Structures are given as C-alpha cells and as structure tokens.
Image: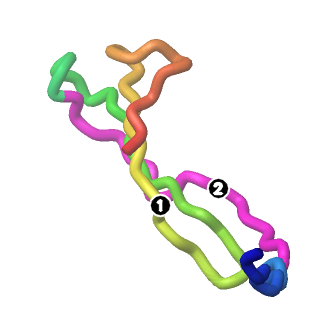
C-alpha cells in the first residue's frame, strides 16, 4: 500500500474582477473604417492589476455578440 501524501492547505479565496482598460477607437483594416474598438482585459485583485489579454470589436464587420479576444 502506498503512503498517502498529507493534504495541503487550500489557498485563501481571492476576489477577482475582470474589466476592460485602455479602450480606444482604431482603424479596421478589414472594412477600411475608423470603427474598431480595442482594449486590454485586466483582472483587478487585492494584490493589484494584471493584464491578461486583449480584445477588439468592429461595429461594422462583427455582429454585436462576437468579439476577437486574444
């Protein structure tokens, strides 16, 4: 029989809020219009702010329920 490892304590719960930051209107190279909204996806935690990705959405090219997230 293999000995069991001791159970590690569970980390404390952390409150996290996702938000958009540095949102700007930009040039859309697909539809050739100044209709692209882009920004950063950030997490707000007790320890500070972390950028976790980027998003972009064109009001002309993309349906309202679709956005490009990277």
Alpha carbon separation for disc pair 1 and 2: 9 Å
> 21 left or right of 68?
right
Q: Which residue is drawn at the image coordinates 66% and 84% (left, top)?
A: 47
* Placement of the C terminus among the 4 image quadrants: top left
In the image, is residue 20 part of the stretch drawn in magenta?
yes
Residue 25 point in image, percent of width and height: 35, 40
Residue 12 point in image, percent of width and height: 83, 79
Which SS class for mark 1?
strand
Whether the residues at callouts 1 and 2 have beta carbons within 8 Å, the answer is yes
Which SS class for mark 2?
strand
The disc label shown at residue 18, or none: 2
Q: Which range of residues does the magenta coloring cover? A: 12-28
Q: Between residue 26 and residue 7, name the one nearer to us.
A: 7
Q: Which residue is drawn at the image coordinates 46% and 13% (left, top)?
A: 63
Q: Between residue 8 and residue 34, name the one nearer to us.
A: 8
- Mark 1 / mark 2, whichever is N-terminal: 2
Q: Is residue 58 above or below residue 61?
A: below
Residue 65 point in image, percent of width and height: 55, 19
> 29 left or right of 59?
left
Residue, disc 1: 52
Q: Which residue is drawn at the image coordinates 23% and 29% (left, top)?
A: 28
In the image, is residue 46 part of the stretch drawn in magenta?
no
- Secondary structure mostly seen in magenta is strand
């Amino acid at each position: 029989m293999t000995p069991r490892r001791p159970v590690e304590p569970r980390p404390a719960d952390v409150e996290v809020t996702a938000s958009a930051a540095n949102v700007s209107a930009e040039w859309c190279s697909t539809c050739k219009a100044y209709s692209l909204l882009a920004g950063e996806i950030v997490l707000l935690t007790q320890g500070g702010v972390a950028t976790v990705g980027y998003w972009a959405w064109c009001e002309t090219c993309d349906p309202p329920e679709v956005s490009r997230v990277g």
